[in-house]
Image (cartoon, rainbow, N blue to C red):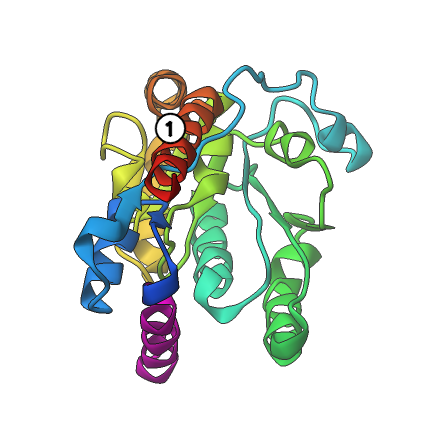
Amino acid sequence: MSAGRKGYVARSMRSLAPYTDTYVCISEYVRNLMKEYSLPEEKLQKILCATNVKVDRDYPSGLREELSLPQDIPVVGSTGVWRPNKGFTYFLAACEMVRAKNPTAHFLLGGKAYSPDFAFSISIWVRGQFLRMLHALDFTGFQEDVGHFLSALDIFVLPSDCEPFGLIAIEAMARGIPVVATNAGGVPELIKHGETGLLVPPQNPDAIAAAVNFLLSDPMRRMQIGESGRLNVRKLFDKTRMLKEYEALYERVAQKKL
């Protein structure tokens, strides 16, 4: 977030403070950010995002069938709104490096253009043409069912410059898909490096490629990390837990009003 944008958000949040009982922070990173905005610490309540953990990876993958991709080739993917901060430029650069070492690897980039950044979306499309000419990349567009997209993958990459939480990462982990993600924002709160996923520096396609190549070179390790990630999500990021925490928060706020 730019300094100007951060200042605008800080002023807006502070202006609401007299009328706000609680600010819900979706990660410790966001909570610390709210502290920097000089918001009353006693009003900051951390409730981590969550997902439906009772999901499985569809096999065989319907998306692979739609794209005529063999079920036994390694597929690496990422998805999200095509904005500069999402890191897809670095993802595509990393894919080119991975392909050089793993010529059977295929790549998927989902998501859709963001209107104010349409020129950037065009640059992503152009950057991907080299891999498309090699028949190594598919742009899948926006997928209404994110599970349909994720089930096609052997590795999910979250290449964002910074994420307040990184919900798509736990969506992938819930399906046992190993995740390579940047260690920025709230993401390190989701992943323990080397155990439940791999963390890399942001804006570093070499590091992304190295992590992906490591996982591709060792299927057993890839499976272990995917399973550890799945178990961690079930333990910490179950939406049932999140709903109970929101219910408790609403009850506390309501009691103060009585």
Res 58 → quadrant: top right
Q: Amino acid at mark 1?
A: Ala
Q: Is residue 170 above or below residue 90?
A: above
Q: Magenta stretch?
A: 1-17
At x 42% / y 45%, what residue is drawn? 166
The percent coordinates of residue 232 (x first, y second) are 33, 21
Magenta-span inclusion, residue 107: no
In the rendered structure, the answer to whether residue 70 lies left or right of residue 162 reads right
At x 44% / y 29%, what residue is drawn? 247
The percent coordinates of residue 18 (x first, y second) are 33, 66
Query: Which one is nearer the viewer's eye here, 14 or 202?
Result: 14
In the rendered structure, the answer to whether residue 229 lies left or right of residue 54 reads left
Query: Which one is nearer the viewer's eye here, 82 or 73?
Result: 82
Could you classify mark 1 by the number of other residues whose Cα lies within 10 Å: few (under 14), some (14-19), or many (20 or more)?
Answer: few
At x 19% / y 50%, what residue is drawn? 42
Q: Main secondary structure of the magenta part?
A: helix
The percent coordinates of residue 43 (x first, y second) are 26, 51
Element under label 1?
helix
Query: Which one is nearer the viewer's eye here, 222 or 134?
Result: 222
Q: Which quadrant holds the N terminus?
A: bottom left
Query: Which one is nearer the viewer's eye here, 8 or 90?
Result: 8
Q: Residue furthest bottom?
A: 4
Magenta-span inclusion, residue 13: yes
In the rendered structure, the answer to whether residue 227 lies left or right of residue 80 reads left
At x 37% / y 40%, what residue is drawn? 253
The residue singled out by tag 1 in the image is: 248
Q: Is residue 201 above or below residue 255?
A: below
Q: Is residue 128 above or below residue 169?
A: below
Res 4 → quadrant: bottom left
